[in-house]
Image (spheres, rainbow, N blue to C red):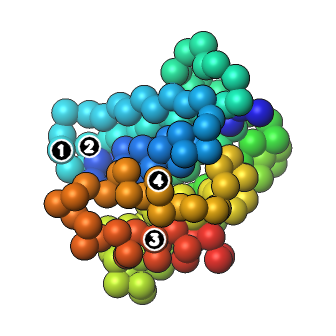
Amino acid sequence: MTTNILLAGFGGQGILFAGKFLAYKGLTEGRELSWLPSYGPEMRGGTANCSVILSDEPIGSPIVSAPDVLVAMNLPSLDKYESTVVSGGSIFVDSTLIERKVKRDDVKVFYVPSTSLAQQIGAPTLANMIMVGKVIKETGAVSYDNLEAALKKVVSARHQDLFDINLKAINTGYEL
């Protein structure tokens, strides 16, 4: 099984971090993986996207041109990538920031108010991880079991105080 995931949004929304978490989660499960970040020159507010491929077989190319899963954290990302999702794929939309509906009817769509939920749980910068929890639940791309091992790899030693709140954000998304 191979799952091609594209996460996209503004710089500062944690797009690369969310992709890195999914990649490490795949790694802890013994999967083949690819993680390819892409971002504009701005540190915050520019565009960012991240391609993650999780597979049971060797991966030939890290490029995701036709994602099975799209996570759109802002309107420009939804506008740009909606048409690239494979028929039968899934689109996850941050409905707090994106008011328009997905135009396609050949994909599964999940409207997740992740930015609003992040504020409600006291973690306003973790809408990305709420979305990751929902992606795990709905796609099965990676297992929900043993999230801690992957999270320990991506939360730096300097930010260990954020470990529990990241786990809470993933669980919040998963429980939606």
User: What's the residue type where badge 3 is placed?
Assistant: Leu
Q: Residue under label 1, please give it.
A: 43
Q: Residue under label 3, please give it.
A: 167
Picture coordinates of residue 29, whole percent (x, y): 61, 44
Residue at 52 percent of width and 21 percent of height: 62
Compute the Cα span from label 4 to label 3: 11 Å
From the viewer's side, name the closer residue of 142 and 79.
Answer: 142
Picture coordinates of residue 26, whole percent (x, y): 57, 42
Closer mark to the observer between disc 3 and disc 2: 3
Compute the Cα span from label 2 to label 1: 7 Å
Element assignment for label 2: loop
Left or right position of 60 against 1: left
Q: Earlier in the sequence, mark 1 or mark 4?
A: 1
Picture coordinates of residue 89, whole percent (x, y): 75, 42
Closer mark to the observer between disc 2 and disc 4: 4
From the viewer's side, name the closer residue of 24 and 100.
Answer: 24
Residue at 61 percent of width and 19 percent of height: 59
From the viewer's side, name the closer residue of 149 and 117.
Answer: 149
